[in-house]
Image: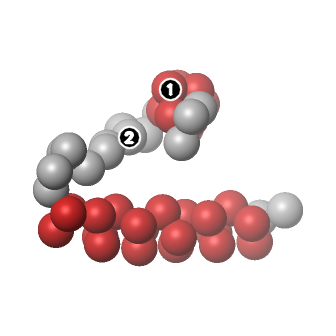
Amino acid sequence: MSQHARLRIDTDLDVYFCDPHSPWQRGTNENTNGLLRQYFVSLR
């Protein structure tokens, strides 16, 4: 997500990151990232 600022501008979507030291947030975050990757790869 090093290009998160560009992603936010290009797609007009909000980008969220987990809070530091909050591992309970990461499971949902990683699952959502994986689903988004699958979606964008299928568009190629």
Query: Which of these two is toward me, 12 or 7?
Result: 7
- Between the residue at mark 1 and the residue at mark 2, the CA separation in whole angstroms equals 8 Å
- Disc 1 to disc 2: CB gap under 8 Å: yes
Alpha-carbon neighbours of circle 2 within 10 Å: few (<14), some, or many (≥20)?
few
Which quadrant would the N terminus be assigned to in this image?
top right
In terms of image quadrants, where is residue 2?
Answer: top right
The disc placed on residue 15 is: 2
* Element marked by disc 2: loop
Identify residue type, mark 1.
Ala
- Which residue does the numbered mark 1 point to in the structure image? 5
Alpha-carbon neighbours of circle 1 within 10 Å: few (<14), some, or many (≥20)?
few
Number of labels in the image equals 2
Identify residue type, mark 2.
Val
Residue found 50% across the figure and 26% down from its top: 5
Residue 40 x, y percent position in the rendering: 68, 61
Q: Is residue 23 above or below residue 14?
A: below
